[in-house]
Image: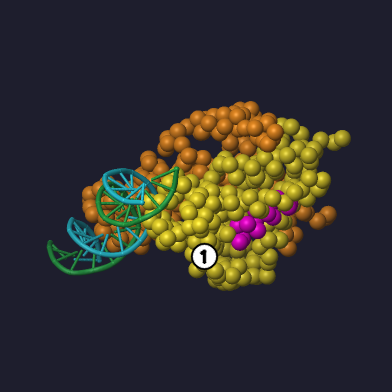
Chain colours: A orange, B yellow, C cyan, D green
DNA sequence: ACCTGAACACCGTTCAAGT
DNA sequence: ACCTGAACACCGTTCAAGT
């Protein structure tokens, strides 16, 4: 039962990443947890990059499992976007991975699903690619920032604490140079990350809606 | 004249990063170029992270130098966004940095300038924060993806070659699972990254325009 | 076929010693 | 005050040797 397998390795890697962040994953720690040496792992995964991709895929597979067939396209897009957001929230390290992975399997799957819904939205052919790209890039941008925010705090710090730190920094900025950041520092403290993320998705969807040709 | 200084170190780091990508920067190579040992560099920069931040700041300072006072807010936002895009295009490694830097000095400066223009656009107070965040996250998302795309190819590969590789991969996908990606593979080959980036900015701006209260 | 663990290469960082 | 370069710690990866 102690037999090594790609699945066990990936699951253990996810556990290490969740517990200690991206710095927590290395082949010695992984080997120790699996009661083997670092070399054994290479029989099952090609290298560290391969392992990180597999770990990201494993975590995102669940997030993308929600079936949205039958939902109106706008709702399907919001559900999909929130699925990615919540997955990054629960596992901040995948935000970094998504930002690096350009056009790799998982990103492509998200892009495909967004694209199908954009099509269902009735967006003219020529504009579908731009619209789907805008949504994907926005989602990946937020994922990357959330990962960066999480990384800037010790692992396990609550979202409220992270926000509090940033809000305090903004409130202290030079009013002459940073009037906007100072003005929104209060809103930042009160705000809901997830709702703001969705507001951004809705903003892009509202922009996409203006593309529809008059019927 | 051989005297070490923070400026010389940062400039040399930028040169290394531009030439060989993120993998090209290490303290031994940097020391060799500066005709000194790795330890000397630490007298002027705190650590590698500090150095990368300084290198990103140096490169982006130029990009953000364009004066947009007097321009209509939409134009100012487009100019600013394109400034970041072009800087990432010329120095792909800053895309990775921007994706990691959350709320650090440079990102904050971009956010501030976007925010001021959003305000000038007449967006209601309560929605300004969401609107500026959406624009920033989109810009950073594209920056991260462009950096990832550049990293996936040997340094110096032209954008057209990168796009060609991705387009070929998309065209080969399973039509049952990836109808959308396959359908846009042709558009991808013909498309202009920069124009698509701007189309995304315009989409968000169009969404923001729907927020304006009826005057 | 799969595992073991020592060894190699590379790198960020420190620090005692110099000027 | 600033530089030198050896040394330390850590890590990804390889590989000869085992079962």
Report the residue at 81% width, 48% height from top. B71
Residue numbers of the magenta segment: B78-90
Q: Secondary structure at mark 1?
A: helix
Foreground of the two, C6 or C9: C9
- In the rendered image, which residue does mark 1 sit on? B19
> For the stretch drawn in magenta, what is the main secondary structure?
helix
Q: Chain of mark 1?
A: B
Quadrant, the C terminus of chain B: top right
Residue that protrudes farthest toward the right in the picture: B215
Residue B173 percent across, percent down from the top left: 54, 68
**In this orientation, does residue A63 appear?**
no
Q: Is residue A74 left or right of residue B36?
A: right
Report the residue at 79% width, 41% height from top. B121
Q: Is residue A157 above or below residue B199?
A: above
Residue A132 percent across, percent down from the top left: 65, 56
Number of numbered discs visible in the structure rendering:
1
Q: Is residue B89 magenta?
A: yes
Q: Is residue B169 magenta?
A: no
Foreground of the two, B42 or C13: B42
């Amino acid at each position: 039962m102690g037999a090594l397998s790609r699945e066990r390795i990936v699951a253990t890697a996810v556990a290490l990443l969740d517990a200690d962040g991206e710095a927590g994953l290395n082949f010695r720690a992984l080997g120790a947890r699996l009661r083997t040496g670092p070399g054994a792992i290479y029989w099952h995964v090609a290298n560290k990059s391969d392992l990180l991709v597999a770990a990201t895929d494993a975590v995102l597979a669940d997030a993308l499992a929600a079936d949205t067939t039958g939902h109106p396209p706008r709702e399907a897009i919001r559900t999909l976007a929130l699925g990615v957001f919540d997955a990054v929230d629960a596992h901040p390290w995948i935000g970094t991975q998504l930002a690096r992975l350009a056009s790799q399997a998982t990103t492509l799957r998200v892009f495909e699903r967004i694209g199908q819904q954009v099509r269902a939205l009735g967006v003219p052919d020529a504009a579908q690619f731009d619209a789907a790209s805008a949504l994907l890039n926005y989602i990946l941008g937020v994922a990357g920032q959330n990962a960066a925010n999480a990384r800037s705090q010790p692992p396990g710090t609550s979202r409220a604490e992270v926000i509090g730190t940033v809000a305090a920094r903004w409130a202290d900025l030079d009013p002459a140079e940073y009037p906007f950041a100072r003005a929104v520092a209060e809103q930042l403290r009160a705000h809901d990350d997830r709702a703001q993320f969705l507001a951004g998705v809705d903003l892009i969807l509202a922009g996409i809606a203006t593309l529809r040709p008059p019927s």
